[in-house]
Amino acid sequence: MMMAVGVFACSAPVEEGKKPISTNTENTNNQIGGEKAPEAAPVATAKTPAAEPKAAMPAGKDGAALIEGSGCRTCHKNDAKLIGPSYQDVAKKYPNTPDNVKMLAEKIIQGGQGNWGEIPMTPHPQISQEDAEAMVKFILIIK
């Protein structure tokens, strides 16, 4: 298990604006006399067809990424009730229309209570209308 972690850490790409862990640009192994590391042999890979998405993703902002980065998963899951309703249940209740997208985006921003029980949905005023709508568009295609 530890070997896999070490391999991943050594092969992880350097994020923009960050310094690499090593400054060894010649690809040499300084611990065993500075010999150049051998080139890796090419690995044959079988081409497999890409998995089919469940539904077409909405154009524009990535609603799924916005959901993951916003804390929504604290209360919601795709396929099961957590604190709030599952996204599948929301998609079943609300047809994917421009009016519903706008209304649900406003509920994300302003919060609400009563549509899914007595537990209130916390307001998220830091989320823009545009981002909230991208999130709703993603939710409404989950079936």
Image (spheres, rainbow, N blue to C red):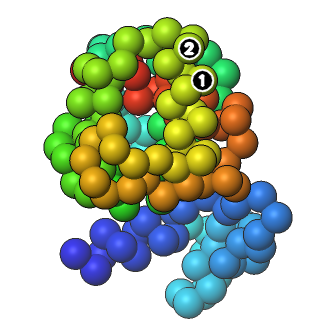
Is residue 49 shown above or below 129? above
Q: Residue at x 39, y 56 (%)?
A: 120
x then y, percent, for residue 93: 29, 21
Residue sitting nearer the eye, 52 or 136: 136
Q: Is residue 46 visible?
A: no
Looking at the figure, which quarter contains the N terminus? bottom left
Residue carrying label 1: 102
The answer to whether 100 appears left or right of 46 in the picture is right
- Quadrant containing the C terminus is top left
The residue closer to the viewer here, 10 or 131, is: 131
Q: Amino acid at mark 2?
A: Asp
Please provide percent x and percent y for residue 61. Answer: 65, 29
| Residue 17 tag number | none
**Residue 79 appears in the picture as rendered:** yes
Q: In the rendered image of this protein, does residue 14 appear above or below residue 21?
A: above
Residue furthest to the left in view is: 80
Residue lying at 26% horizontally and 20% vertically, measured from the top left: 92
The dot on residue 99 is: 2
Q: Secondary structure at mark 1?
A: helix
Marks 1 and 2: CB-CB under 8 Å? yes
**In the picture provided, is 5 more to the left or to the right than 17?**
left
Amino acid type, mark 1: Lys
Q: Is residue 39 left or right of residue 91?
A: right
